[in-house]
Image (spheres, helix red, strand yellow):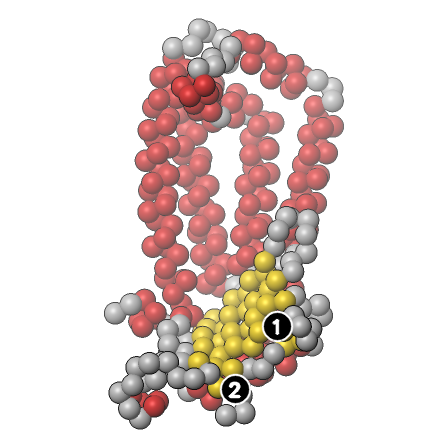
Amino acid sequence: MSLVDKYGGGNILIYGLPLIMAPLIAIAAALGWIITRFTLGYLRRQPDFPHKEEVMAGAKRGWLVVVGSMAAAGLVLWLALYFSFYPRTVGKLVVIVLALHTTYLAYRHPWYYLGHAAWLHWLKQLIFRRATDWKQFVARWERKRKSSWGPIWGALAVGMLVAMGLWWAESGLQYEGLAWQIRVTAPSENVVRVLSYCGEGYPWEKPEFGSIMIMVAPDTPRQEMKEILHSARQLVEQAEPWPRGSLDVWDGYRRMCKADWDTHKGGWGEEGCSWEASENEAGSNTTGPLPQTNEND
């Protein structure tokens, strides 16, 4: 029995995300540990330089920081999917927090940060045969830290990072808010989950494409799916602006009702449904797809 058959389309992401994240974290941990061994060997072979022990300590623990960040980000995203209607916004906020954490680490613990990035110098020497003079490298870093302009440039960088990050996170907030409204006003108890997606380019761009997926239980009657779609469409039409996209009601496996944005008309097209016939619904053993129907059928 597949995850869709067991839990329905509304919960497949919830139960599938840990199955995806666990091997990714395991692979990252294994690769991180291997790279750390080579990096530490590379640093030991370097002539003594200031703060060498701190740099090596940072290199030794760098893979733990990466794996821990991945695990924490995955857990937060899973909780956002499970408990909220704003998983993409939460995911963007996690990216912003990780970027701020990296900036803070580089400012407060510069030698540990250099250790985290030491594997890049090992790769540079391994691939390009370009050795790093660690005495000069650390001396340049020290001069930058002690410069009177350092805190000013750091504050400007953090301010821009926060401003652009919040703009980016807010860009999809409206559409996830629509998903929440659809969920609480849906004329059916068979709605399991409502997820929104807004296509984005750069963080400073507003989305030009958006879609909402309404996931229902696998045994939801088709007429009920049509009513859910029609109710959601009426709600979405009241929201301005709505980007080009689609509005879908999906049972997680066989059937889907949808309405697409018609770029030629500049409005929503007709609502339609398609499904794979079953013995109970079609009164036959036919398993091929039935023709698409509209809401007036």
**Quadrant for the N terminus in the image:** bottom left
Q: Is residue 187 left or right of residue 63?
A: right
Is 127 rendered above or below residue 290?
above
> Is tag 1's residue or tag 2's residue first in the polypeptide sequence?
1
> Crowding at label 1, few (<14), some or many (≥20) Cα neighbours within 10 Å?
many
Q: Residue furthest front?
A: 264
What's the residue at 57%, 74% (across, down)? 260
For label 1, the SS is: strand
Q: Amino acid at mark 2?
A: Asn
Q: Position of residue 161 (x, y in %)?
A: 66, 40
Q: Report the residue marked by disc 1.
A: 261
Q: Position of residue 244 (x, y in %)?
A: 63, 67
What's the residue at 65%, 70% (across, down)? 263
Q: Report the residue marked by disc 2.
A: 294
Tell me the distance, in whole angstroms, between the alpha carbons under discs 1 and 2: 15 Å
- The answer to which of 105 and 156 lies nearer the viewer is 156
What's the residue at 57%, 50% (across, down)? 92
**Residue 3 makes an appearance in the image:** yes
